[in-house]
Amino acid sequence: MTAESRDANGKPPLVKICGIKEETTLRGMAGLRVDYIGFVFAKSRRQVTPERAAQLREASRSVAMAGGQPPLTVGVFVNPTLEQLEQTLAVVPLDAVQLHGDETPEFAREVRERLNVDVWRALPVQDEDDPSAGAAHLETYAGAVSTVLLDTAGGGTGRTFRWDVIPAYRRAAASSGLRLFVAGGLSPDNADELVAAYRPDGVDISSGVETDGAKDNGKIAAFVERVNNA
């Protein structure tokens, strides 16, 4: 792996596999370098209930990833209320809450402070967007979230956005003390290109490691390998 494709600590980007619904998917990831798994609570074909997420989280505790530890858990929400988040966290103790709607920096900060949970903010990127304006919007989340995730507008589309905007967002994230993850249309076929060229802090994938709408452990392993060896 080239130095350019590693982060400041000499490690490849963090990996998040989102849209987990089955224990077999978790068992198949044993030994892989997967840092986060994601549960979708928003309306989606990948949606799970808090009770089901709690079962999956418990199952994940016995799955050792490459570092010998189980993956951290992230819940994906779209425009939730504080009460909805509180109720969900009472059922399944997530490590992070990912806000994927129109949530403001003020709301994100309130979630973090009142619920004592790590908060991520997904930001949609459209091809016609001005990256400098997008980067300025990212900066408004400094101090409110730990991580900003760039995704194709609409989310879950399986399409990439214009990767040439990533450097502007990366600079803004670094200056704001935020981690930058990239999602949207990633797959085992393009992961190495993204990592080598743009060096995000993390990558997030869902549909790109599915076959006929179900998670494919062969594709997950291939994706992780590509990210590691970019």
Image (cartoon, rainbow, N blue to C red):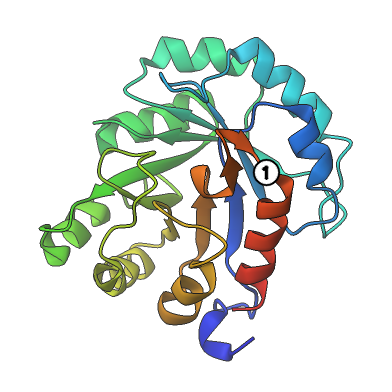
Label 1 crowd bin: few (<14), some (14–19), many (20+), radius 10 Å: some
- Seen in the picture, residue 204 relative to 50 is either above or below; the reply is below
Q: Position of residue 30 (x, y in %)?
A: 84, 48
Residue carrying label 1: 216
Q: Residue at x 67, y 43 (%)?
A: 216
Task: Determine whether the residue tagged by mark 1 lies in a helix, strand or loop.
Answer: loop
**Kind of residue sitting beneath label 1:** Asp
| Residue under the image location 53 percent in, 9 percent down | 87
Q: Is residue 214 left or right of 85 when viewed as pictured?
A: right
Q: In front: 157, or 180?
A: 157
Query: Which residue is at the front of the view, 70 or 145?
Result: 70
Is residue 81 depicted above or below 198 in this figure? above
Location of the N terminus (image quadrant) = bottom right
- Measuring 57% from the left and 67% from the top, which residue is drawn there? 13
* Res 56 → quadrant: top right
Q: Is any atom of residue 115 visible in this view?
A: yes
Q: Is residue 6 left or right of residue 172?
A: right
> Can the viewer see residue 74 in this picture?
no
